[in-house]
Image (cartoon, rainbow, N blue to C red):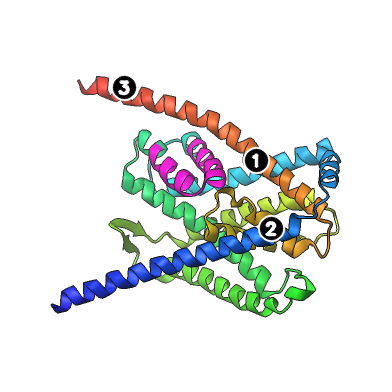
């Protein structure tokens, strides 16, 4: 067998093994989450959960709604950074509308629907090229995960997450992960400031390293969005909970959701919060807070986003018809 053919064969074989390994890890993690969730909720006092939900005041729910709106504005502003980065001519209103719809669908139906398919569809219907949409998406994704790494790195490094006594052995491991996350975040910021190579090519797309000012804005918006999400859950939980713990648990559950590929992290969020908070709070209080969180942050925005999507689709069809008429 020629050398090049042999190398290609080894590369394909390695990719197949990596693919199978990824599927096995994902399946194992999914089974673990299901088993953990079942063991935690099998003896739940559901009437107590309903009673806790009925006990939320209108002021609390209104405050939660304000926090949810602020978080969606922060997330949608990632795409405004993409507008600044690419220099495209869509208006701020158009960008915020598209980003809001994509975020709501992303949270509820997964990244392939929200972040990818819907973003490309809506932006290209507004006249942006695929390359421009890819660069906007790259800025948005980096903002989200840069903010995540900075917050998770800080919480894990300084051991701000209050773990159950049986889990305390994992604090050192989390601390090491935290140092790594902070190091990766700092490396990105330093690269934005000092790197002489500004252009990278990923799967045929050109990615230009942003300036430091834009990178710092990515970090600020990303951290603000994750913090607001945690603030909403914190608002719905009893007062004795430590906020950095709530934020840390949310960040852990987000990664668990990414690994399992479960849309909306359904069951994953609940399993992680119950596992890490049940030593401090009643299960009914935790579940009530998470149900309220899902209603305010997932379901209500999804309903609004669906209506907005229909409006954007109608505008897109009108634009296409007008273009066809002008080309005749």
Judge by depth and name the residue closer to the eye, 296 or 213.
Answer: 296
Gap in angstroms between the C-alphas marked 1 and 2? 29 Å
Gap in angstroms between the C-alphas marked 3 and 2? 51 Å
Q: Nearer the viewer, mark 1 or mark 2?
A: 2
Residue 120 shown in magenta:
yes
Would residue 2 appear left or right of 291 to someone viewing this image? left
Taking the spot 54% from the left edge, 58% from the top edge, the residue there is 260
Percent x, y of residue 238: 84, 53
Q: Nearer the viewer, mark 3 or mark 2?
A: 2
Residue under circle 3? 321
Mark 3 is surrounded, within 10 Å at the Cα level, by few (under 14), some (14 to 19) or many (20 or more) other residues, namely few
Residue under circle 2? 37
Mark 2 is surrounded, within 10 Å at the Cα level, by few (under 14), some (14 to 19) or many (20 or more) other residues, namely many
Quarter of the rendering occupied by the C terminus = top left
Residue 69, disc: 1
Q: Earlier in the sequence, mark 1 or mark 2?
A: 2
Q: Earlier in the sequence, mark 1 or mark 3?
A: 1
Quarter of the rendering occupied by the N terminus = bottom left
Q: What is the quadrant of residue 119 in the picture? A: top left
- The residue segment tinted magenta is 96-121
Would residue 9 appear left or right of 65 to someone viewing this image? left
> Are the residues tagged 1 and 3 within 8 Å (C-beta)?
no
Taking the spot 46% from the left edge, 29% from the top edge, the residue there is 312
Taking the spot 37% from the left edge, 22% from the top edge, the residue there is 318
Percent x, y of residue 94: 47, 34
Percent x, y of residue 208: 36, 59
Residue 323 shown in magenta:
no
The secondary element bearing badge 2 is classed as helix
Residue 246 shows in this picture: no
Gap in angstroms between the C-alphas marked 1 and 3? 34 Å
Mark 1 is surrounded, within 10 Å at the Cα level, by few (under 14), some (14 to 19) or many (20 or more) other residues, namely some
């Amino acid at each position: 067998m020629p050398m090049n053919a042999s190398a290609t064969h080894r590369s394909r074989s390695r990719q197949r093994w990596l693919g199978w390994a990824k599927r096995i890890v994902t399946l194992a993690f999914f089974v673990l989450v299901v088993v953990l969730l079942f063991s935690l909720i099998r003896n739940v006092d559901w009437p107590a959960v309903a009673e806790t939900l009925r006990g939320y005041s209108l002021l609390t729910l209104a405050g939660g709604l304000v926090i949810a709106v602020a978080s969606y504005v922060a997330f949608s502003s990632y795409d405004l950074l993409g507008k600044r980065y690419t220099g495209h001519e869509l208006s701020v209103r158009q960008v915020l509308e598209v980003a809001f719809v994509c975020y709501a669908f992303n949270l509820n139906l997964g990244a392939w629907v929200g972040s990818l398919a819907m973003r490309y569809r809506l932006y290209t219907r507004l006249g942006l090229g695929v390359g421009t949409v890819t660069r906007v998406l790259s800025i948005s994704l980096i903002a989200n995960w840069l903010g995540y790494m900075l917050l998770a790195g800080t919480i894990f490094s300084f051991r701000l997450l209050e773990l159950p006594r049986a889990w305390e052995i994992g604090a050192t491991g989390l601390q090491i992960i935290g140092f790594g996350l902070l190091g990766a975040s700092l490396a990105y910021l330093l690269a934005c400031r000092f790197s002489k190579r500004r252009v990278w090519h990923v799967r045929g797309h050109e990615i230009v390293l942003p300036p430091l000012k834009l990178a710092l804005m990515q970090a600020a918006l990303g951290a603000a969005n994750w913090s607001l999400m945690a603030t909403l859950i914190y608002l719905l939980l009893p007062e004795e909970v430590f906020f950095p713990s709530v934020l840390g648990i949310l960040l852990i559950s987000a990664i668990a959701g990414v690994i399992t590929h479960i849309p909306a992290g359904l069951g994953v969020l609940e399993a992680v919060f119950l596992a890490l908070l049940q030593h401090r709070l009643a299960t009914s209080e935790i579940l009530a807070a998470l149900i309220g969180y899902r209603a305010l942050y997932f379901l209500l925005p999804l309903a609004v986003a669906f209506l907005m999507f229909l409006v954007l689709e109608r505008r897109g069809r009108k634009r296409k018809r007008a273009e066809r008429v002008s080309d005749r």
